[in-house]
Amino acid sequence: MFYIHPEECINCGLCLSVCPVDAVVWDEEIAAGSETFVAINREFFDVAVTGWGSPGGRDEKWVTDKDHPAVTAHRHAF
């Protein structure tokens, strides 16, 4: 899964074009029940998951095999 840093996102739309499953939506278009994914994206960068804080954009050095616990749990449910 790719994670979007909520404070660093500049709404350029690049993530929309590279998402292979059309899972990216604008904040104003989040479907009811999917609001938790905003928090999941924020928490991914926090100390509880990667500890990256604000990495300053996408870069090859910001790659990890870690996922947010909610994403890991969802993946293992299938």
Image (cartoon, rainbow, N blue to C red):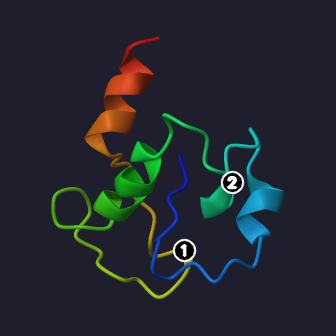
Q: Which residue corresponds to mark 1? A: 60
Q: In this view, does 57 lie to the left or right of 63?
A: right
Q: Which label was assigned to residue 25?
A: 2
Q: Which label was assigned to residue 32?
A: none
Residue 14: % across, % down: 77, 70
Could you tell me which residue is drawn at 73 percent across and 50 percent down? 19
- Element type at marker 2? loop
The kind of residue tagged 2 is: Val
Residue 41: % across, % down: 42, 58
Residue 17: % across, % down: 83, 59
Could you tell me which residue is drawn at 24 percent across and 67 percent down? 46
Could you tell me which residue is drawn at 44 percent across and 55 percent down? 38
Q: Residue farthest to the right?
A: 17
**Which sits in the foreground, 51 or 13?**
13
Could you tell me which residue is drawn at 47 percent across and 72 percent down? 6
Front of the two marks 1 and 2? 2
